[in-house]
Image: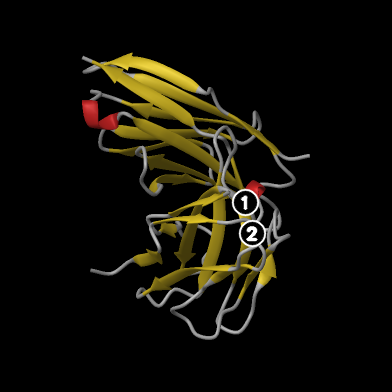
Amino acid sequence: IAGITQAPTSQILAAGRRMTLRCTQDMRHNAMYWYRQDLGLGLRLIHYSNTAGTTGKGEVPDGYSVSRANTDDFPLTLASAVPSQTSVYFCASSDGQDNSPLHFGNGTRLTVT
Amino acid sequence: GQNIDQPTEMTATEGAIVQINCTYQTSGFNGLFWYQQHAGEAPTFLSYNVLDGLEEKGRFSSFLSRSKGYSYLLLKELQMKDSASYLCAVMDSNYQLIWGAGTKLIIKP
């Protein structure tokens, strides 16, 4: 079934630890995104990639890094987790056209203690 | 700054009609999206408006007035499965999506 797969589904992480959230899509979409969703706030863009080999910073990039070595994969890394990074993280993709909707993965629920 | 406003929560009755409003102030406008998000799940696309007027898709319709910075999502013949959050998002002049916090819709029998 075509779509976006995120892993893990949930994780409890000690502060200061390094963590990579995985995201893979099989729709051959050019654009991919990482969002965080917190209660009472809209989705906030962390990083994005318009095409393989390029990445850009979103609204809240500090403490996060991404890479886009190929079209399908877009991992998000927390170098040294802090409690304020407790959130639900969604990966999304689109074909990059202005009116194209985003396709979201099922999310990763991360708790930093 | 850029801002999207939606009601936090609404309640409606099964079989009825509900209108969820979204007002926006953004630097430019390149389209408005509505998404549905069931609790604990991913957002899924509902509709896209870039020109003024009403777009109808089955039980769901979305309206846009660019001069008023206003949109609404109209849900008819409400079903229990329509209980979800509805997210409004505007694409600004830089083609970045600005998201509202979402409206939680509760459907009562």
Say whether marks 2 and 1 touch (CB < 8 Å).
yes
Q: Is residue A64 above or below residue B2?
A: below
Q: Amino acid at mark 2?
A: Ala
**Residue A60 or B1: which is nearer the viewer?**
A60
Residue at the spot of label 2: A81
> Residue B38: x, y in percent?
34, 39
- Direction from residue B44 to residue A32 in the image, left or right: right
Q: Is residue B103 above or below residue B90?
A: above
Spot the residue most to the right.
B1
Q: Residue at x 66, y 32 (%)?
A: B67
Crowd class of label 1 (few under 14; some 14 to 19; many from 20; radius 10 Å):
some
Q: Residue at x 53, y 22 (%)?
A: B7
Q: Is residue A113 above or below residue B12?
A: below
Of the 4 image quadrants, the one containing the C terminus of chain B is top left
Circle 2 or circle 1, nearest the eye = 2
Q: CA distance from mark 2 to mark 1?
A: 7 Å
> Residue B25: x, y in percent?
70, 35
* Snapshot quadrant of residue B46: top left
**Residue B38 or B15: which is nearer the viewer?**
B38
Q: Are marks 2 and 1 on the same chain?
A: yes
Crowd class of label 2 (few under 14; some 14 to 19; many from 20; radius 10 Å):
many
> Residue A23: x, y in percent?
44, 69
**SS state under label 1:** helix
Q: Residue at x 62, y 51 (%)?
A: A85
* Snapshot quadrant of residue A29: bottom left
Residue at the spot of label 1: A85
Chain letter, disc 2 residue: A
**Residue B23 or B56: which is nearer the viewer?**
B23
Colour setup of the view: secondary structure
Chain letter, disc 1 residue: A
